Amino acid sequence: MFVKETTKGMRDILPREAEIREYLLTKMKKTYASFGFSQIETPCVEHIENLTSKQGGDNEKLIFKILKRGEKLNEAAEGLDVDALVDSGLRYDLTVPLSRYYSNNAANLTLPFKAMQIGPVWRADRPQKGRFRQFVQCDIDILGDNSNSAEIELITATSTYLESVGVGGVTIVINDRRILSAMAKASGFAEEQFSTVFIILDKYDKIGEAGIEKELLESGYDAECVAKYMEIFRGAMAAEDRFSYLEGALGDAIEGGVIANLKEICESVAIISDGRFKLDFDVTLVRGMGYYTGTIFEIKSEDFKGASIGGGGRYDKMIGNFTGQSTAACGFSIGFERIVAALVEKNFKPEGAAEKIAILYDKRMGAADIALMQKKAMAAREGGRIVLVQKMNKNVGFQKQKLEADGYSKFVDVRFPDEMAKLEEI
């Protein structure tokens, strides 16, 4: 017997949500295109070697793997080697596919290349409210530009889009992985310990300053290293000018120009946006993706109770895994599904949406009268309105309730031929 429910972790999208999604995507494409980003597409299936390259962090544990086909599968199955059964997988993000795309097509692209990529990704995550195994990601990336113009434009374009769709109280939080490394290095931690220190620091929003210190000590790290680290951390958090403080506190541990670069990004965005977009330099921002090499950023909004609704950063080493040559790369991704869910909950009506009219007719109406209704509807559609012509259900009240949920705001009931004059109302 067939199963009517979706596969676990997947979902059906109803008309009202589909309308909001289409509005947001149309607005996004228009906004990003105005900044010179070109829309591209990549396959949903990638080579398993690319997906398991130790660049995707915990996402690599969540890959939907695809078995080999035909004789190759039979041969692999005989050896009982699970890894040998797989040769590809569904993409878990759009950054790895973009890096492969650029490596394969660079000769045919304008450099620097500004890419806009929108599409579904898949992660074998544990399904829960608001978290699905298939969801849409919306990325913009600039490849081949090693200046901070890339970060400035990505931040400006993303903020412009969020403002255009009414997401309120947006703050772009920014940091640099090299600052995180310098803080750990200046405190005496060994390089192989950095990633664990970052993971603990990333819990700041949940466990606070005291919790970070406690967990570092409980992890067995040298007490002097932890004390020095917390001294730098507290100083940065308390400083009125964090940039100046860190320049002094980190000394030779930080690469030259890193802090000045961040400061320039913040100042430039403020000038470009005339103060409309807020940037906040936050030393607790970590981001878990293993491929970030420099600046990192996240989006927070008052409309989402401080939760992140997007993020990104610089990943200058990833494309080199495909080509053998280092290529500057920086990208920003919007939390599309989270924004959609919030707007659906608010019963959001897309800006500029066409008026939706429903003509409901009685089953006793003849074919000629119905044809006249359709003719009138055609004229209204040419005027930019959305017109539905539909037979009345027995429970017309419930029928209208459902149509209202789909955005219909005007109803014309035609029960008898002599009521055809009502059509003049549209």
Image (tube, helix red, strand yellow):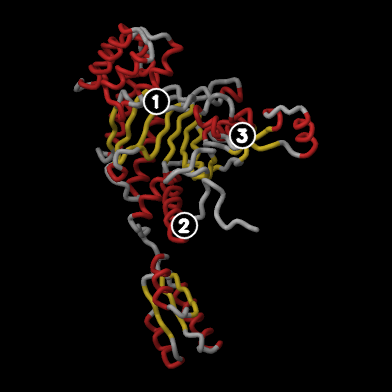
List the residue tagged with mark 1. 295
Would you say 213 lies left or right of 292 here? left
Q: Position of residue 54 (x, y in %)?
A: 55, 24
Residue at (52, 36) in percent of width and height: 93
Residue at (30, 17) in percent of width and height: 214
160 vs 374: above or below? above
* Quarter placement of the N terminus: bottom right
Q: Of circles 2 and 1, which is in front?
A: 2
Real-space CA distance between mark 2 and mark 1, rounded to the nearest whole angstrom? 35 Å
Comparing 285 with 293, the one in front is: 285
Quadrant location of residue 357?
bottom left
Q: Of circles 3 and 1, which is in front?
A: 1
List the residue tagged with mark 3. 105
Say what secondary structure mark 1 lies in. strand
Q: Earlier in the sequence, mark 2 or mark 1?
A: 2
Comparing 83 with 278, the one in front is: 83
57 vs 114: above or below? above
Q: Is residue 252 visible?
A: no
List the residue tagged with mark 2. 18
Q: Is residue 293 visible?
A: yes
181 vs 208: above or below? above
Q: Position of residue 29 (x, y in %)?
A: 46, 48
What amino acid does circle 2 point to? Ala
Quadrant location of residue 284?
top left
Say what secondary structure mark 2 lies in. helix
Say what secondary structure mark 3 lies in. helix
Would you say 325 lies left or right of 227 here? right
Real-space CA distance between mark 3 and mark 1, rounded to the nearest whole angstrom? 26 Å
Residue at (34, 9) in percent of width and height: 186
Comparing 249 with 85, the one in front is: 85
